[in-house]
Amino acid sequence: MDQQSASNLDIKKPEQTAPTPQNTPINPAPITSTYRPNISSIAEDNMESNNTTTGAAGALSGAFTGNPALISMLQGKLGTLVGRPSGYIESLPESVKRRINGLKYLQSQHAELEGKFQEEVLALEKKYLELYKPLYKKRAQVVAGEYEPTDEEVALGEKVDADEEEQGDKKEQDAKKAADIEEEEDDNKAKGIPEFWLTALKNHPQIGESITDADEEALRHLVDIRMSYMDKPGFKLEFEFAENDYFTDKVLSKTYYYQDHAQGGDFVYDHAEGSKINWKEGKDLTVTVETKKQRHKGTNKTRVVKRTVPADTFFAFFSPPVFPGESEELDEEEAEGLDAKLEADYEMGEEFKDKIIPHAVDYFTGKALEYEDFEGDDDFEDDFYDEEDEDEEEDLDEDSEDDDDDAAPTAKGQNAPECKQS
């Protein structure tokens, strides 16, 4: 479903040119911004220089470049002016204002039609998802080794490659077929398509960056990824796992909700909710245990402190960032950081919904990379998962002299910090 980005977010999506049934540009739904835009920089390139103004301009430039606080203050002031009326409309003749009101009515009628358009598009997507499901189900059976493709299906699959790709040297192909025959005995020992989804995810440039070596061991047990639409605007992703050593859950899910009413014909992203993962003891990939020494100022005694801190992991995907409470105020930098995380989180969900799930085999083989130019795409920055590092060493207060047990709290009267996913 085509959806336009919010005006206050710069969302760059690679164009999709793959010859597939869903060959339409994919744009994320607008995301409600939590902060007002400001002026990011003050351009001085166009300042005129002459004999009478050179000195003043130089002094002004020096004042800006040497005083970041002044720049920040001016940016904040300018940011408050964005969206304020200029007085132009109020100055127009009444007859012109009357016509403008007529245009506003026409625009409202257009918005109503846009809303109906989006509703029909959503209904069409739901209809075709039901038609796709039998194909997805059979795909999952092939991957799991529960269904063996027929000779006809295999032949037609080979024809797809023959039609879409240039064929190599015939001798080379014959040699490859001979090698395949020789290895047929070993191939028969394999069940289904091992590590199908892990390979597909790693071949996606941005999602692959979020998968750590530790994640790979858990993701080897991923047997299917599905999506469904909600009764209310939104969609749900389901990740099915075989029994594994990491968590007891058979299915991990994440649901993306839109606001109840479309704005200007577009569904606006509201929030996401992810599954609580029931990790087995000592297997939680979302945290890591840090061990460091602390030295007492007075006695010079040392102790070992252990605490859990958030870890970079793919599974942070199931703990999406959330909007702060009404009583919690964010400064501009924090608000921008939160918006970036929300945007990256939503777009990753869109990648699963519109690319990974429909075209999983193309990502498994790497063919999908031929369709898109991922270079320079910053939509999935690592800061979606990054957390600030803690200081390497902390000194103890003199009052905690007697507290020298292993795995002691980091400060008097405090427990080790809890791991919280942003």
Image (tube, helix red, strand yellow):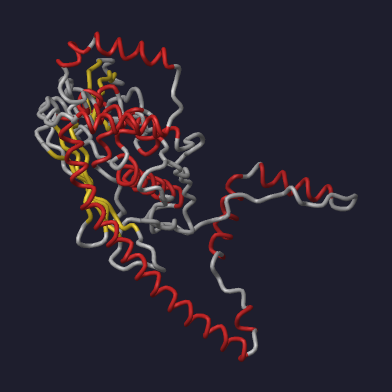
Up-down: is 377 above or below 30? above
In the rendered image, which quarter is residue 190 located in?
Answer: top left
In the rendered image, which quarter is residue 138 located in?
Answer: top left
Residue nearest the viewer, comparing 84 with 218: 218
- The answer to whether residue 146 is left or right of residue 92 is left
- The answer to whether residue 15 is left or right of residue 98 is left
Residue nearest the viewer, comparing 268 with 130: 130
Task: Return the x and y of residue 303 as percentages of the image width and height.
Answer: 22, 18
Task: Return the x and y of residue 254 as percentages of the image width and height.
Answer: 22, 46
Which residue occupies the extreme bottom position in the image? 95
Q: Residue at x 30, y 46 (%)?
A: 353
Q: Residue at x 17, y 11 (%)?
A: 185
Q: Residue at x 50, y 34 (%)?
A: 375
Q: Is residue 411 visible?
A: no
Q: Where's the C terminus, which quadrant?
A: top left
Task: Return the x and y of residue 324 as percentages of the image width and height.
Answer: 31, 54
Q: Where's the N terminus, which quadrant?
A: bottom left
Task: Return the x and y of residue 330 as percentages of the image width and height.
Answer: 39, 53
Q: Residue at x 27, y 40 (%)?
A: 317
Q: Is residue 85 visible?
A: yes
Total marks shown come to 0
Residue nearest the viewer, comparing 170 with 411: 170
